[in-house]
Image (cartoon, rainbow, N blue to C red):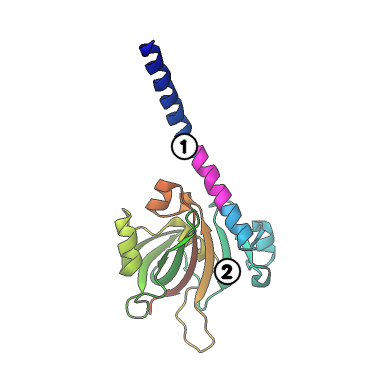
Amino acid sequence: MKKILLLIIATIVVFASCNDYETYGDQKEKERNAINKFIADSSITVISEDVFNQNGYKTDLTRNEFVKLDKSGVYMQIVRQGCGTKLQNGETANLICRCKEYNIMKDTLAVETDVFYAAACPDIMRVSCTSGTFTASFTKAIAYNMYYCYGSAAVPAGWLVPLTYINVGVPQNDDDEIAKVRLIVPHSQGHTMATQNVTPYYYELTLQREA
């Protein structure tokens, strides 16, 4: 009788453990739900790439529009187009970037490099464009140290998505604006910790060419 009781208890423990186990599919569903909740809570209007293209690659700020980019799954809002020109094919350049990073799953602000030491020590990433594909690595400052601790100095792929659409020049005149975008980045386009934990992040980024 005692053996039967122990067997029943062991079965219950194993069953409970199986119920607690999350598959990758479960984690992705949680991520989708978190992103959808963030979109709803933020009163975001999602538009398709077709609409975005028809609108001249612009998002309407009055409607809080974000375009969902099909290839990457990134949601993007262009706040300021920026000055100068886009990165050209075959070009490599240093870009100054400042960011706010917000963990959507935990509903917390994770990083704010546009405030801490931004003026004296901005984040720099070295970006190359090859046939319309961008690759980049951080070279110094807060973001470099943060992502290096995450296991890689590579810039998250989601950060590079806007470079197809924005200008990254050096402001020359009073009315020249630094490019600014807002992004919802799924784990597959994020940094190492985002990928490992299947966590989406929201970003506010400014990007400009280093003088």
Q: Is 67 positioned to the left or the right of 153 in the image? A: right
Residue sitting at the far front? 1
Check disc 1: other Cα within 10 Å, few if <14, some if 14-19, many if 20+. Answer: few
Residue sitting at the far top? 1
Tell me the magenta residue range: 25-34
Residue beneath disc 2: 78
User: Which disc is residue 22 wearing?
Assistant: 1
Where does the image place residue 82, in percent across and percent down from the top left?
53, 76
Q: Is residue 164 visible?
A: no
198 or 74: nearer the viewer: 198
Residue at 44%, 74% in the rendered image: 208
Dot 2 lies on which element? strand
User: Which disc is residue 114 wearing?
Assistant: none
Residue 167 magenta-drawn?
no
Residue at 41%, 21% in the rendered image: 9
In the rendered structure, which amino acid carries the disc numbered 2?
Ile
Q: Main secondary structure of the magenta part?
A: helix
